[in-house]
Image (spheres, grey):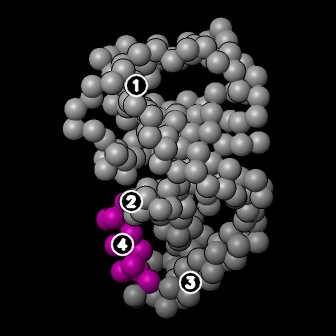
Amino acid sequence: MNVQEYIDSGILYDYSIGALSQKEKAAVDRICALHPEVKAELQHLQQALEQNAKETATWPAAELQETIWNTLENINKEKAGNLSDLPVVNKYSDYNNWKRLVHPFMPKEIKEDRIIKTIRQSGGVTQMLIISKTDVEEETHSDERESFIILEGECECHIGDNVYKLGPGGFLEIPMHISHNVKVLSPYVVAVLQHIAV
């Protein structure tokens, strides 16, 4: 075997980036064990690739970083199930985690047309458990951002000229200054409604 030709073939690069099958990787490992100069070249190539990755890596913009960290924090809070430290509801929220979180507030029997229970009111964030058999009348918000996640049931939300049909896990953020209403499509809807003051 011509060692230099083997090194120049590009197989070590393919090995380093994970482009080889298990059988091909095993063959490279055997050749490295037989030829120390191939093993040394492979190590040198892997170090060069790692150094290049470090030098060319870029972090996301500060705003995106904040969104990523906030999302991870929310996921951890949802899983922890601590009612005294509820996360903000967003499009990444897991409705099953929220169903667990609000379970202590759920009535055994739904008799009223609408039940509203505040579950968080801190840091400019108000969250309410809403259980509604009736439609939500048209409204507009000018001093708070409204969003909600559906836990049970189905509804249809009209925002301006747009219509959104939502079921369990559906999340919707309502733009400020735009008229909206909600029509209940199932016997009742259970949701977490969130207002963030601006």
Farthest front residue in view? 112
Disc 2 target residue:
81
Q: Is residue 183 above or below residue 7?
A: above
**Residue 84 x/y as whole percent:** 47, 62
In screen coordinates, is 130 left or right of 193?
A: left
In screen coordinates, is 179 left or right of 14?
A: right
Of the two numbered discs 3 and 4 on the same chain, state the one appearing first in sequence.
4
Crowding at mark 1 (Cα within 10 Å: few <14, some 14-19, many 20+): some
Give the secondary structure at mark 4: helix
State the predominant SS element of the stretch in magenta: helix
Disc 3 target residue:
43
Crowding at mark 2 (Cα within 10 Å: few <14, some 14-19, many 20+): some
Give the secondary structure at mark 3: helix
Give the secondary structure at mark 2: loop
Of the two numbered discs 1 and 3 on the same chain, state the one appearing first in sequence.
3
Residue 93 vs residue 40, the one in the foreground:
93
Mark 2–mark 4 Cα distance, whole angstroms, equals: 50 Å
Magenta stretch encompasses residue 24: yes
What kind of residue is marked 4? Ala
Mark 1–mark 4 Cα distance, whole angstroms, equals: 68 Å
Disc 1 target residue:
114
Quarter of the image where the N terminus is located: bottom left
Q: Identify the magenta region.
A: 19-32
